[in-house]
Image (cartoon, helix red, strand yellow):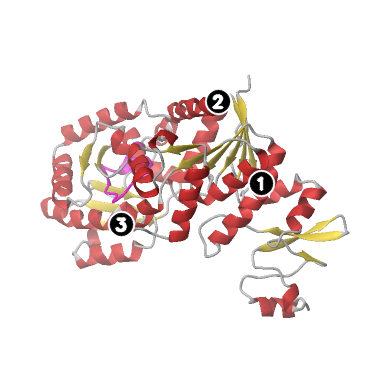
Amino acid sequence: MRKGKIFMIGWEYPPNITGGLAVACKEIARNLALEGYEIDFLLPRLTGNEEQIEGVHLLDISSGWEELSESDRESLASSRQWIEVSERLQFSPYFTWKESASINHLDEDKMPAPGFVAVKEKERKTFLLPEIQGGYGKDLLRDIHWFAQFSAILARKSKPDLIHAHDWMTFPAGIAAKESTGAPLIVHVHATEFDRCGGSGNSEIRNIEEKGCRLADIVISVSEYTKGILIDQYGISESKIRVAHNGVNLEEASLTDSVEKPFFENPIVLFLGRMTHQKGPDYFVKAARKIANEIPEVKFVMAGSGDLHNRMVELAADLGLGAHFHYTGFLDSEKAHALYDMSSVFIMPSVSEPFGLTALEAMSHNKAVILSKQSGVSEVVDQCIKVDFWDIDRLAEETVCILKYGPLREEIGRRARSDVNKLTWSATAKKITQVYRSIL
């Protein structure tokens, strides 16, 4: 029996993965569908390689456009962000507007804004459909605004009982959908601008986050840690916030057990995540120097990409650790899980971590995990070692102890797996279901 129709809005979805957000969106949708909800899930752009999940109907700008009536298309075309032209244009992001106008023999003032694709309508009119790639490029704020306009019309067509928007990029779309349908809005905060930037961050993004939380009927936070930030920084009422911790897909761990041999015979200490300030990669590298002093044969693997990647390579070299470090770049899910298997210890030294899915993933592989106390995941796991992100002395001491004593390492790993068995996405969905029931 169907429990309700949900219009869900996201910015990332596997296989288009930047971080944990994409995985969380997919697993939450999958498990809510198993709970009996019907989900229309709107994203900026689909690749065509997404897993088809019963009960989850994926939509993007292109496919959603095909579902719109002529009157809806005309409504969008008449707004300032939509431009009507008389022919299909050859437009390249590598040309300026003037250069593109010259190529197409058009006047400058008839040129569309970058990011539009002409869509022919019954040979009578041609409307411009916004080409939104998703991701986090220089036109992100513009794309978010256009996405919101589109969301309002598609939500009305979906006729949902409830709207559920994941993270700040979708909050304007969630607000627009609420205004067009009258359905209650839940905003799901997976991270805040304060986490990402280590300070006040971008004022426009902060304003979007705050407005989304204020206009939502309920706010879901991924941790008590993030809930505290929403209360302290945005003044959101505690009574409005519900916490639903993330989960882990235990099946992914079982599929990769012992599929590969380590590329080093030596013990491996793993960092897996974006190399940005938020994730604390510099604390990992600095602790590595102290660890290598005690265990010269140790190897360190940093898996991921980010704005601090080159700086971390330089820092490791400056500390005389060049031969100890291996950098993999971004890894897909299968390779990431294989790397967990190869590792001896996993370290998550995040400066400010709303949750920390990678810690659960490593624990699901029976690995000893050392994680930052400044994280949401530290609220729900016990069988790991918790340190302050800045305490590199203790971080190094704990790592050396685990590496030197094999039986201790195995026991911590065994208990870690037992600890995460209860932290499933199904459990997360059941908590969200309780939130849904409170407003449906």
Can residue 265 be seen here? The reply is no
Q: Is residue 301 left or right of residue 87?
A: left
Amino acid found under the numbered disc labelled 1: Ala
Name the residue tied to disc 1. Answer: 152
Q: Residues within 10 Å of mark 2 (few under 14, many from 20)?
A: some
In this view, 159 is above or below 421: below
**What's the residue at 69%, 44% (across, down)?**
154
In this rendered view, identify the residue nearer to me: 105 or 54. 105
Precedes in sequence: disc 3 or disc 1: 1
Q: Which residue is mark 3?
A: 326
Q: Nearer the viewer, residue 405 or 3?
A: 3
Of badges 2 and 3, the one in the foreground is 2
Residue 283 inside the magenta-drawn segment: no
Q: Are marks 3 and 1 in contact (CB under 8 Å)?
A: no
Q: In screen coordinates, is 86 left or right of 363? A: right
Count of marks, rendered view: 3
Residue 79 visible to the viewer: yes
Tell me which label, 2 or 1, sits earlier in the chain: 2
Towards the viewer: 231 or 337: 231
The residue segment tinted magenta is: 338-360
Q: Does the magenta-highlighted stretch encompass residue 359?
A: yes
Q: Position of residue 102 (x, y in %)?
A: 73, 80
List the residue tagged with mark 2: 34
237 relative position to 377: left or right: right
Looking at the picture, which amino acid does disc 2 mark? Leu
Say which element carries label 3.
strand
Q: Secondary structure at mark 1?
A: helix
Observer-side mark, 2 or 1, equals 1
| In front: label 3 or label 1 | 1
Q: Quarter holding the C terminus?
A: top right
The kind of residue on which mark 3 rests is: His
